[in-house]
Image (cartoon, rainbow, N blue to C red):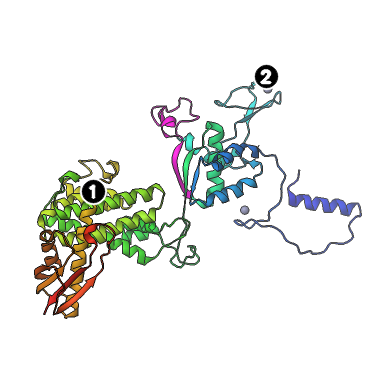
Amino acid sequence: GLERLEAREAIMNKLQEKGFVEKVEEHQHQVGHCYRCKNVVEPYISKQWFVKKEFAKSSIEKVNSGEAEFFPTHWINSYNAWMSELRDWCISRQLWWGHQIPVFYCRDCGHEWVEEGDVPTKCEKCGSENIYQDPDVLDTWFSSGLWPFSTLGWGNGDAFKGELWNESDIKDFYPNSLLITGFDILFFWVARMLMMGENITGQLPFKDIYLHALVKDEKGEKMSKSKGNVIDPLVTIDKYSTDALRFTLAVLAVQGRDIKLSEDKLEQSRNFTNKLFNATNFLQLNQEYFEDLDPANIKTPLGRYMLARFNIAVKETREYMDIYRFNDGATTLYRFLWGEFCDWGIELSKADKNSISELGSIFKASMRLLHPFMPFITENLYMRLSQDSLENGDSIMIMPYPTASEIDDEVISQFDLIMEAIVSIRRCKTLIDKGNQKIEKASIKLPLGVDTDMMKPFIEKLAKVEEITFVDSKIDNCVTDVSDNLEAARACLANQAVRSGINC
Ligand SMILES: [Zn+2]
Ligand SMILES: [Zn+2]
């Protein structure tokens, strides 16, 4: 037929010719335009290929019976909403790029067939070579829906076997454990993979589906070029480092909430990387290289305390990663490495140099624990502390992820008391305006039965007191500070208040 604009003119001429036209006038009405090129959209009836909606049925049932799980869980509602409004899926596109639809036509006998194998050379019915393939290609989501198994050699015949894929790949890696993607393609991609996998292989392609947050600006607004609030990852990496950006995103990735990315948060993560560098420098001032962690070799009280804290961090980080709470995992590591290891552990080690080799081993193991969150700096520091390099040794990426050994609660309550005593004496010193100076004497009343000999040097060093005396009665005539035990319920050692005082 004629092109539409030519046809309009021809019809007008015909009508006029026959004397059917009374008048021609301007008329305003709504016309759809293409959002990209602004051309008028003209409906056009054409023949297309469709997949029946029933194709999705068994995958919907399996997902709803719990064979696949969404994180955050509420996404199953969106999935079901999409699937309940399902219509037959138009899978043909009139584009150049894509998988060409494997339907063939015979020009001689009119036969039409689908070919599962290689491209045929003649008509399967009459043998004529005068055949052609449907010029349409598959919808891109039809092809991407095959991704979970087409990457594992499925549909390749023997092509590239042993070179690009191995026969066991599909058995080893299908179904997969986890898919991570954005919620905006939950229907287009995730639902299609589920239905394709279920129908073609008989199994859903993955067990867990983690839908991650959208990264927005600090005010929670969507980044856009026109608003000028785009934080460019490449610029950010130049300014703060890749690890700082990655860690920031992890810390902010609260399930079910958008990420509000800000310079403040990035700075905080960069400071964290500095802290780790400084810790390494401190350790190496005392000893150049450190053994890999073996809990049986950790003997000093401080070493055992740091090991206990490390074990808690390992346990928590693993638990959080198992349920995809990356923000809680990152926060745990930040608390352990900054608060417990650097702020206390390193300071306390100044009162017991023998513990430093043990702390170095624990720090190395901590770098492995932190590795998924900060891959570059952890690798670098681990190698530095091991007298190793990536060129000579294995990356920590492929080393086993740390596991927790038994947590020593007793040493934790001992050190909780030590730290409580230090803080308490520091408060006393502030009261007499000697906040940062060394003082001669202080007394502490500790709960009965604690190992005061072990505690003494730590308290003296960090509270800056020449001589600590342990007393068992109320301290008179002095500045006194009484503090509750933060860990009162934790162990019998810690069931009394710490009382410290400075005679003046
Ligand atoms: Zn257009
Ligand atoms: Zn034929």
Q: Is residue 91 left or right of residue 173?
A: right
Residue 421 highlighted magenta (yes or no) = no
Q: Please report whichever mark, 1 or 2, sits nearer to the chain's N-terminal start.
A: 2
Is residue 388 shown above or below 247?
Answer: above
Kindly identify the amino acid type of the residue bearing the numbered disc 2.
Cys
Seen in the picture, residue 473 relative to 122 is either above or below; the reply is: below
Does any atom of ligand 2 lie closer than 8 Å to the CB of label 2?
yes
The residue carrying mark 1 has its beta carbon less than 8 Å from ligand 1: no
Residue 371 visible to an observer of this rendering: no
Provide residue 325's location: percent of width, then percent of height.
40, 53
Q: Which residue is labeled 1 in the image? A: 365
Task: Answer with the quadrant where ligand 2 appears in the image.
Answer: top right
Residue drawn where x is 69% and y is 26% of the image = 107
Residue visible at 44% across and 33% down?
152
Q: Is residue 30 visible from the viewing direction of this image?
A: yes
Of residues 281 and 366, which is closer to you in this image? 366
Disc ID at residue 126:
2
Magenta stretch: give its range.
Answer: 152-181
Q: CA distance from mark 1 to mark 2?
A: 71 Å
Q: Looking at the picture, how far across and down is residue 90, in whole percent?
A: 64, 42
Which amino acid, by three-letter code, is at mark 1?
Answer: Ala
501, 246: nearer the viewer? 501
Secondary structure beneath label 1: helix
